[in-house]
Image (cartoon, grey):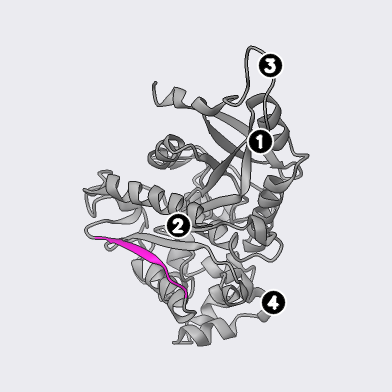
């Protein structure tokens, strides 16, 4: 069986107001497996666990299916009969962090609904259902922001919260680092080969911009050059200003030297948007945590993941980490893009095994 025929892809709209979609990939070998074709009768739909992989793109661009789609993960999860889900979500700018968290809540509540198009179509036409008690999330780069939020948001019922959280070189580890806050003296492009068109910035930040949740990335960037916003926010130290809708915030934070001081300076009604792990202290059931990050990452510094893991350690929560020597962002060879570092296949296999073990332990 070819890779393409090993799964079937379906697209659903989980937010009809903002027209936000997700793709779900179904193992072909399990479609209507429970049906007695001769008598055309069947038992209850086959319940399958699911993994939700939130795409990267600096939170400003990217799509559920583009040049950076994690095919390497899809193939492995499908081979283990795990449903693979790739959602869009609203992007910075004109949307903000609050909007993205609302999208995550809407997405998970959609998964839990027994009247949704997803539930009915999978059940009636394919003889399967998504087991919402066996969900995992993967955040790839900027996709770590919606991914991490899913294990923390109060509006997501506890029973459907992810049982496993995997951070692939995630951007949401620590937005209070100098890396994101300080204005850079020497301008640079974060991702090699990505555009930084200054003439586009004013247009992209205009109030006339429409809400956007689908901005496919190609190797050289996206069609509208929204990735220029990523470079702009980084160089000007403005990510938090736009993520939290707090103009001037980062400039004030530059004068505060400690992480605790920076966090406390942020308005209390906006602190939750930084997704502190503290909320997990109150949870009796916590997800399994896995961090995967290249040591030479020059887009999202590995310190971001170190700090995120340290936050968990301070709470007495165990996690696993894979720090990859010689790897830049995306686990590409440092200085030799687009070649992946040696040993990535083993890392991807470990990722899937970690997920399956977490599901079994649940």
Q: Please give the range of residues in magenta.
A: 317-324
Of callouts 4 and 1, which one flags the residue occurring earlier in the amino acid sequence? 1
Report whether 179 appears left or right of 345.
Answer: right
Q: How far apart are marks 2 and 4 (CA)?
A: 27 Å
Q: How far apart are marks 2 and 3 (CA)?
A: 40 Å
Residue 234 versus residue 63: which sits nearer the camera?
A: 63
Q: Distance between the residues labelled 2 and 1?
A: 24 Å
Q: Nearer the viewer, mark 4 or mark 1?
A: 1
Of callouts 2 and 4, which one flags the residue occurring earlier in the amino acid sequence? 2
Residue located beneath label 4 in the image: 269
Of callouts 3 and 1, which one flags the residue occurring earlier in the amino acid sequence? 1
Q: What crowding class fits label 3: few (fewer than 14 Cα within 10 Å), some (14-19), or many (20 or more)?
A: few
Q: Is mark 3 on a helix, strand or loop?
A: loop
**Residue placed at 24% from the left, 55% from the top?**
334
Q: How many marks?
A: 4
Q: Nearer the viewer, mark 2 or mark 1?
A: 2
Q: How far apart are marks 4 and 1 (CA)?
A: 33 Å
Q: Distance between the residues labelled 3 and 1?
A: 27 Å
Q: Nearer the viewer, mark 3 or mark 4?
A: 3
Of callouts 2 and 3, which one flags the residue occurring earlier in the amino acid sequence? 3
Q: Please say whether residue 29 is visible from this viewpoint.
A: yes
Q: Residue 12's mark?
A: 1
As drawn, the residue found furthest toward the top would be 38
Q: What element carries label 4?
A: helix
């Amino acid at each position: 069986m070819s890779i393409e025929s090993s799964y079937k892809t379906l697209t659903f709209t989980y937010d009809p107001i903002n027209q936000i979609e997700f793709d779900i990939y179904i193992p072909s070998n399990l479609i209507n497996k429970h049906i007695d074709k001769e008598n055309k009768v069947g038992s209850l739909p086959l319940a399958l666990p699911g993994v939700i992989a939130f795409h990267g793109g600096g939170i400003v661009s990217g799509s559920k299916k583009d040049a950076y789609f994690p095919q390497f993960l899809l193939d492995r999860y499908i081979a283990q009969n795990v449903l693979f889900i790739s959602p869009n979500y609203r992007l910075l700018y004109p949307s903000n962090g609050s909007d993205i968290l609302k999208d995550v809540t809407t997405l998970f509540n959609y998964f839990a609904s027994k009247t949704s198009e997803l539930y009915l179509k999978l059940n009636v036409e394919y003889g399967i259902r998504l087991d919402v008690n066996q969900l995992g999330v993967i955040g790839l780069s900027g996709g770590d922001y919606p991914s991490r939020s899913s294990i923390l948001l109060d509006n997501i019922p506890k029973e459907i919260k992810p049982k496993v959280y995997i951070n692939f070189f995630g951007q949401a580890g620590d937005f209070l680092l100098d890396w994101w806050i300080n204005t850079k003296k020497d301008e640079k492009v974060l991702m090699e080969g990505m555009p930084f068109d200054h003439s586009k910035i004013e247009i992209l930040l205009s109030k006339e911009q429409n809400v956007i949740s689908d901005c496919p990335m190609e190797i050289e960037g996206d069609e509208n050059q929204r990735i220029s916003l990523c470079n702009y926010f980084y160089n000007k130290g403005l990510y938090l200003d736009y993520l939290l809708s707090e103009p001037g915030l980062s400039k004030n934070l530059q004068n505060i030297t400690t992480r605790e001081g920076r966090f406390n300076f942020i308005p209390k009604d906006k602190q939750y948007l930084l997704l502190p792990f503290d909320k997990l202290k109150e949870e009796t059931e916590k997800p399994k945590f896995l961090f995967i990050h290249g040591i030479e990452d020059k887009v999202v510094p590995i310190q971001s993941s170190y700090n995120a893991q340290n936050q968990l350690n301070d709470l007495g929560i165990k996690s696993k980490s894979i720090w990859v020597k010689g790897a830049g962002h995306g686990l590409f060879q440092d200085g030799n893009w687009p070649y992946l570092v040696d040993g990535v296949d083993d890392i991807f296999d470990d990722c899937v095994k970690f997920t399956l073990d977490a599901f079994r332990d649940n």
